[in-house]
């Protein structure tokens, strides 16, 4: 091999090496490889075939100066050239196809007046992964043995480059999947579950992370509404700012407004100095209005005004203030029913209920109980700096069979008590102390259909927070049937 060819070969190797570090996808890399081959061999056109992992067939992955829609033009070449290279895994060179007997009958060679052909296998660790084909209709291209040597050297480097980029793409996809899983496990680490119901909650939370849309979190007491609110905050762009929660149910009615918006000195008896409200403490961050259904109608008016433009006036004050924060609200009550009863303002409900995330009761996703038990026992062990206790299969069965009216919060309390009650490193059934369930919640042999129907209706209404329309939809019955059953119950 003369000096000029050696330089070309070395330059090609250098170019391919650069591509390994710069090109992020296989298609772009293949096109670059073709460009290098055509430029160095003064060829007109070419294509690269790669082995399909599923079918093991060689499929066109990139081409230059060949219409992809007219790939059938290459059928004769594929049979006479590519097939030989594929089967023998050896390079093939035609210096002059017009004089080469193996190409004299090739229709595409004759019609397209192809003068020179060079085709080499792409081999990786002795395994064929594809083929590089180039040709020229100009005899001036003058393919020779040195051309083939160059193309072979290029193909060796190209095979490594292709494999590296494929590996990088696979790692990237795997990394994205792992990021998503880590995001769910760690970012929502207090929200545990793998059931369809909890996956839906995670999906909904994920959709609201990157915007400031107002979210209403609903669900029974103990389902984790505040945990969901914290997950939204901690994974949003406001995560470095405060998360402030106010439980409207535990603050005396006459003090809720002062807690929210603050007050000035002398605003009321006991107001001995100015006080900053929680909305100001949450500046830049997130404010959770927990148990929003408990606030009185008068405060609802002021809250509505605040939600509209984030401005407020402290109790007893005269100057208007403005804050930049995100509002989340939570309630275990059916606000639609409260609106119907004129207990809750309709305009405030719609302002809060821009997007609703409903936390399911634990009885509706019992398959998550083993995951929750494991999570809670680990947390208890961390907090107590003691060895994590195991739980017997019988004890787990007892937990799964229970209806959990207090939901996850009740499960935590039961397990905390069980850890204390157990005498060894394992929690057994006798360590699990549960509330006595109403015997009427169980179906017993010999019960009448009317009794079972009424039990199912009562439990469904409870799960729907008394919403008869939703209960009818879930049970697949008419609203009229529900009213009839309830009327008959009253008579009985």
Image (cartoon, rainbow, N blue to C red):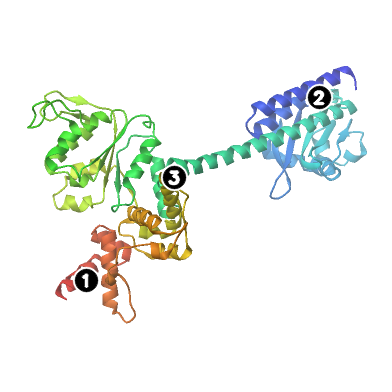
Indicate whether 230 appears above or below 442: above
Residue underneath mark 1: 485
Question: What is the C-alpha distance between the residues marked 3 and 2?
Answer: 71 Å
* Circle 3 crowding by C-alpha within 10 Å: few under 14, some 14–19, many from 20: few
Q: Position of residue 422 (x, y in %)?
A: 41, 59
Whether residue 97 is visible to the viewer of this picture, yes or no, is: no
Q: Earlier in the sequence, mark 3 or mark 2?
A: 2
Q: Is residue 271 above or below residue 2?
A: below
Specify the farthest residue to the bottom: 446
- Spatial separation of the CA atoms under disc 2 and disc 1: 88 Å
Disc marking residue 385: 3
Of all residues shown, which one is farthest toward the top? 3
Q: Nearer the viewer, mark 2 or mark 1?
A: 1
Q: Circle 2: is it few (<14), some (14-19), or many (20+) Cα within 10 Å?
A: many
Q: Mark 3 to mark 1: distance in Å?
A: 54 Å
219 lies above or below 84: below
Q: Which residue is mark 2?
A: 41
Q: Secondary structure at mark 1?
A: helix
Q: Residue 376: tell me if it is visible.
A: yes
Query: Image quarter for residue 46?
Result: top right
Q: Earlier in the sequence, mark 3 or mark 1?
A: 3
The image quarter in which residue 159 lies: top right
Q: Earlier in the sequence, mark 2 or mark 1?
A: 2
* Relative to 68, 428 lies left or right: left
In front here: 48 or 396? 396
The image quadrant where one finds the N terminus is: top right
Quadrant of the frame with the C terminus: bottom left
Residue at disc 3, secondary structure: loop
Q: Position of residue 186 (x, y in %)?
A: 46, 41
Mark 1 Cα shell of 10 Å, populated few (<14), some (14-19), many (≥20): some
């Amino acid at each position: 091999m003369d000096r000029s060819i050696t330089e070309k070969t070395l330059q090609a190797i250098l170019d391919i090496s650069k591509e390994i570090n710069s090109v992020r996808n296989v298609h772009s890399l293949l096109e670059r490889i073709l460009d290098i081959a055509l430029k160095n061999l003064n060829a007109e056109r070419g294509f690269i075939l790669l082995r399909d992992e599923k079918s093991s067939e060689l499929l066109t992955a990139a081409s230059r100066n060949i219409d992809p829609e007219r790939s059938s033009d290459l059928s004769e070449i594929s049979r006479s050239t590519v097939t030989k290279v594929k089967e023998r895994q050896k390079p093939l060179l035609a210096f002059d196809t017009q004089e080469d007997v193996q190409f004299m009958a090739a229709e595409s060679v004759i019609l397209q007046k192809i003068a020179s052909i060079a085709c080499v296998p792409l081999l990786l660790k002795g395994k064929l992964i594809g083929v590089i084909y180039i040709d020229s209709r100009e005899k001036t291209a003058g393919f020779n043995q040195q051309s083939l040597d160059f193309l072979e050297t290029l193909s060796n480097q190209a095979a490594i480059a292709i494999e590296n980029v494929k590996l990088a793409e696979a790692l990237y996809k795997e990394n994205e999947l792992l990021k998503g899983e880590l995001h769910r496990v760690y970012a929502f680490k207090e929200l545990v579950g793998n059931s369809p119901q909890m996956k839906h909650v995670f999906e909904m939370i994920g959709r609201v992370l990157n915007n400031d849309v107002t979210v209403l979190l609903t669900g029974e007491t103990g389902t984790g509404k505040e945990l969901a609110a914290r997950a939204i905050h901690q994974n949003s762009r406001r995560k470095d700012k405060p998360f402030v929660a106010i439980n409207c149910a535990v603050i005396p009615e006459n003090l809720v407004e002062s807690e929210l918006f603050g007050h000035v000195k002398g605003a009321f008896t006991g107001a001995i100095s100015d006080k900053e409200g929680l909305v100001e403490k949450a500046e830049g961050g997130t404010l959770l209005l927990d148990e929003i259904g408990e606030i009185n109608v008068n405060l609802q008016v002021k809250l509505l005004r605040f939600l509209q433009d984030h401005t407020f006036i402290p109790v007893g004050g005269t100057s208007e203030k403005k804050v930049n924060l995100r509002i989340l609200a939570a309630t275990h009550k059916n606000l639609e029913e409260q609106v119907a009863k004129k207990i809750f303002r309709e305009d405030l409900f719609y302002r809060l209920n821009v997007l609703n995330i409903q936390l399911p009761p634990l009885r509706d996703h019992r398959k998550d109980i083993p995951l929750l038990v494991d999570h809670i026992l680990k947390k208890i062990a961390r907090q107590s700096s003691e060895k994590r206790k195991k739980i017997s299969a019988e004890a787990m069965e007892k937990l799964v069979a229970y209806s959990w009216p207090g939901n996850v919060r009740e499960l935590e309390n039961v397990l905390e008590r069980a850890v204390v009650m157990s005498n060894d490193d394992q929690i057994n059934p006798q360590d699990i102390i549960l509330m006595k369930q109403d015997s009427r919640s169980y179906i017993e042999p010999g019960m009448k259909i009317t009794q079972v129907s009424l039990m199912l209706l009562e439990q469904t209404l409870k799960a729907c927070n008394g919403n008869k329309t939703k209960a009818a939809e879930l049970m697949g019955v008419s609203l009229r049937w529900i009213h009839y059953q309830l009327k008959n119950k009253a008579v009985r």
